[in-house]
Image: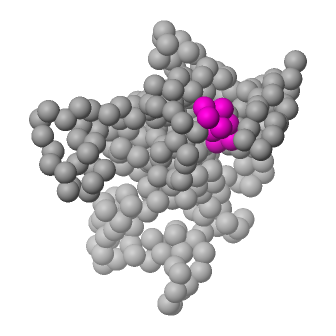
Amino acid sequence: MATVYHLQHGAIELDDHAARNAAFELHHCFAELGGNFDSEQIAEHFNGLCRIPASSDYAFAYDRWRRALATMGATCFEATVDIRLLIGLSQPSLWETNLYLNPVYGTPWIPGSSTKGSLRHYIERYLIADPADAEALKQGYLSAQAFQHLFGAAAGEGAGAGLVVLHDAWWVPASAPPALGLRHRGPDYPLVREVTTPHHPEFLDTQGCAEATPFDSPRPVPQLATHGKFLVAVAPRLKAYRAWAPYAAEYLKLALRFEGVGARTPEYGQLR
């Protein structure tokens, strides 16, 4: 039986399979609430998204993607979210919050640019050593030259692309935590509800012009998060660079574990 969405300028008719796409329902069904809604209505809408399981089509697509990575010579590993992952929170959204969702399958994903940023930040912060310090380099520290080879340079001497490509990380099918009441519905459900509660909304809305007092009422803001596992892939840009992929992957494991990725790190966004 078809599902019909009555939007502002007409109606869109979809079959039930297509309608159960979390990305579609999150981003394209804004008008279902009439454009006038409160946090409780948003929370209920988000609850509905969390009741959408990953489709069987996604499992086939994921398997195809994993095989494609193997042909590229990519180094892959599964990374498990410790608590929750908030990725894409700063992207424009009608709901004042967002989450990166695959537009075709409705499943969460981590952009390669995010994992690359986490890796770069981790190495710059902890692992850059003087090229003359042979002992440090033996222990796994990187020289500035190796860092430039890994990430590339935009201008100046040695400008060019890095030797490895960090691909988008796909959510691993059936990897969410086991069912636990309404919070965790089971391994096939990649989305989970989150909330932030600013305690001084008027102070924040006026950028500090209004006084913050102990008597201010908190304002819950519904959000979406994800959990489970992600397939992280590092591929050589050319076959001649294939030794660099596992090299970068080992550092990336450390970056995701200790620095994390996404919003509210390091409490959230840590993957092991």
Q: Nearer the viewer, residue 80 or 226?
A: 226
Quadrant that contains the N terminus: top right
Q: Position of residue 227 (x, y in %)?
A: 51, 30
Q: Residue at x 29, y 66 (%)?
A: 135
Q: Residue at x 60, y 64 (%)?
A: 164
Q: Position of residue 261 (x, y in %)?
A: 44, 48
Instruction: Tell me the residue at 26%/32% (across/down).
Output: 218
Vertical relation: 241 (above or below) 225: below
Tell me which secondary structure the magenta stretch mostly adopts: helix
* Residue 177 within the magenta-colored segment of the rendering: no
Span shown in magenta: 27-34
- Quadrant of residue 200 in the image? top left
Taking the magenta stretch, the answer to whether it contains residue 31 is yes
Q: Is residue 149 above or below residue 183?
A: below
126 with respect to 53 (left or right): left
Residue 21 occupies quadrant: top right
